[in-house]
Image (tube, rainbow, N blue to C red):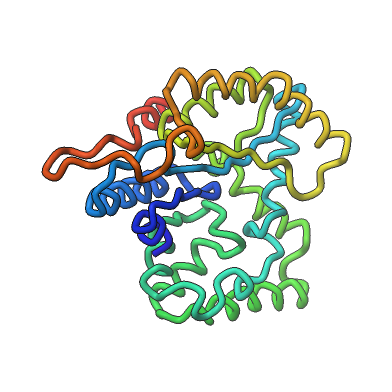
């Protein structure tokens, strides 16, 4: 619903770290609605927020990247009713969200793919709370230890990294992955958010320093190379669409396939 509303009002739409294939579908939906509204969508209409953590070594970066799984309302220690309360999303939107989440993906803002699936089949988001409470009761009874719960969370990390939902590494390894994001989604606005969870102040500052000194300058050059215009350079909704013509290509899933291979 948000994507359609933004396109109808010619507002940019920002994806908050959503999986790339699902985000590409949203971009295309926006483009189709924009064409019906009589304008051509482009990079100026889209933004994307990406989790990135940078360290001096790959080993340290992996350690810091895993901390992301414990923050920001991810699949650990968050209450689903605060994320998707009844009435916050329509039942149809909840079903679509469930379809985009695959097992082990870490879920959406604290709501796991399994919980979303149950909500989809039952049609009642309230069931999410009952599932979460069941896990908490098992921990309270000692059937699941805190360490076992942590290890279960960590198992989602390799898939999150493979799907580029978490990018962690040295500047040398991070920059090519960010190029893939920019090539696939072509966002005119690109944001980076830092480490979450149990990460020291020193490690956070090291990541910020490496981002500022090495990563962000490279990202800016990639954006220029790809011709990505932001909404200040090119006002959204001002390029007319010619009825009957093929609209502009907004995403490049070929870049994603090349990266996965």
Quarter of the image that includes the C terminus: top left
Q: Is residue 56 above or below residue 107?
A: above
Quadrant in which residue 128 is drawn: bottom right
Q: Residue at x 74, y 38 (%)?
A: 64
Quadrant in which residue 146 is drawn: bottom right
Q: Residue at x 50, y 65 (%)?
A: 114
User: Do we see residue 181 in this rendering?
Assistant: no
Front residue (pair 169, 25): 25
Where does residue 67 sit, x and y in percent of width and height? 73, 46
Q: Is residue 213 above or below residue 43?
A: above
Q: Residue at x 45, y 18 (%)?
A: 225
Quarter of the image that includes the N terminus: bottom left
Count of marks, rendered view: 0
Q: Is residue 250 left or right of residue 227?
A: left
Front residue (pair 37, 165): 37
Q: Residue at x 37, y 44 (%)?
A: 24
Front residue (pair 198, 90): 90
Where does residue 156 sit, x and y in percent of width and height? 59, 49
Q: Is residue 174 left or right of residue 14?
A: right
User: Do we see residue 78 in this rendering?
Assistant: yes
Q: Is residue 237 above or below residue 75?
A: above
Q: Is residue 66 left or right of residue 25?
A: right
Where does residue 161 sit, x and y in percent of width and height? 57, 38
Where does residue 140 sit, x and y in percent of width and height? 77, 76
């Amino acid at each position: 619903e948000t994507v359609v509303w933004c396109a109808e009002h010619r507002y940019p739409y920002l994806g908050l770290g959503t999986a790339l294939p699902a985000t590409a579908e949203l971009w295309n939906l926006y483009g189709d609605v924009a064409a019906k509204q009589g304008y051509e969508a482009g990079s100026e209409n889209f933004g994307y927020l990406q989790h990135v953590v940078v360290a001096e070594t790959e080993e340290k970066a992996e350690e810091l990247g895993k901390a992301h799984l414990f923050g920001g309302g991810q699949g650990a220690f968050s209450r689903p009713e605060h994320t998707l309360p009844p009435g916050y999303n329509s039942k149809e939107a909840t079903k679509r969200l469930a379809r985009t989440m695959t097992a082990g993906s870490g879920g959406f803002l604290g709501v796991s793919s399994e919980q979303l699936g149950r909500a989809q089949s039952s049609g009642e988001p309230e069931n999410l709370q009952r599932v979460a409470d069941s896990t908490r009761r098992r921990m309270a009874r000692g059937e699941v230890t805190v360490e076992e719960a942590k290890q279960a969370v960590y198992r989602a990390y390799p898939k999150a990294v493979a799907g580029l939902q978490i990018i962690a590494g040295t500047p040398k390894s991070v920059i090519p992955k960010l190029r893939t994001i920019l090539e696939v989604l072509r966002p005119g606005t690109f944001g980076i958010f830092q480490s979450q969870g149990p990460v020291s102040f020193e490690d956070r500052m090291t990541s910020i320093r490496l981002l500022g000194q090495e990563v962000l300058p490279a990202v800016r050059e990639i954006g220029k190379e790809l011709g990505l215009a932001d909404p200040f350079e090119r006002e959204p909704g001002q390029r007319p669409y010619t009825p009957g013509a093929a609209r502009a290509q907004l995403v490049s899933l070929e870049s994603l396939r090349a990266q996965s291979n």
